[in-house]
Image (cartoon, grey):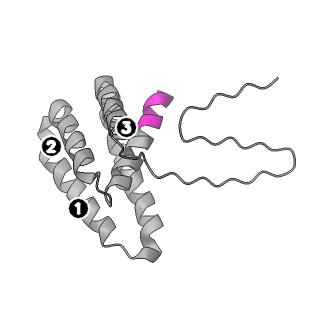
Amino acid sequence: MDPTLIALASAGGTAVVSAMATDGWERLRTGVVALWVRFRPDSTAELEQDLDTSRTALLETLDSDIDQARQALQSVWQGRMLTLFLEDRTAAAEFKTLLLELAKDGHPGPDMKFHAEAHDHARVYQAGGNQFISER
């Protein structure tokens, strides 16, 4: 499986869930629906209902459970995105363009949190985007 598609699907699922509680939700939702209309028109109505149901569930989640709810929803949407991208790589390219346009227009990307622990001689590399490591 192509790691680039996996990474894009991961970013996509995170972006969808992150946008659910922000002002950028309608724009991202419109872009995702347009993607489905183009590549999976038979399942567009189901997608729209699932987006709305997911958003409602997230907005109604208690603060104490919000991280767990976000993770669960991100997994669901990452899976849906990956399935679409594996079916048609053009969909992946168009979704990447949507994310870049949103970022350019001032809508932040997914809210990322990193946590790592290194012990002894271990190394940890974390990135919210491309990462290039050159060791000698």
Q: Is 30 drawn above or below residue 1 in the view shown?
A: below
Q: Is residue 53 above or below residue 112?
A: below
In the image, the segment drawn in magenta is 3-8
Crowding at dot 3, Cα within 10 Å, few <14 / some 14-19 / many 20+, comes out as many
Three-letter amino acid code at the position of disc 3: Leu
Query: Where residue 25 sits: x, y (%)?
Result: 27, 53
Which residue is the site of mark 2? 44
Residue 21 occupies which quadrant of the picture? bottom left
Inspect the image, locate mark 2, and give the three-letter code of the amino acid beneath it: Thr
Q: In this view, does 1 lie above or below 67?
A: above
Q: Can residue 46 be seen in this view?
A: yes
Front residue of 19/33: it is 19
Give the amino acid at mark 1.
Answer: Thr
Res. 53 mark: 1
Q: Do the residues labelled 2 and 3 touch (CB within 8 Å)?
A: no
**Residue at image coords 16%, 42%:** 43
Is 115 on the left or on the right of 10, as rendered?
A: right
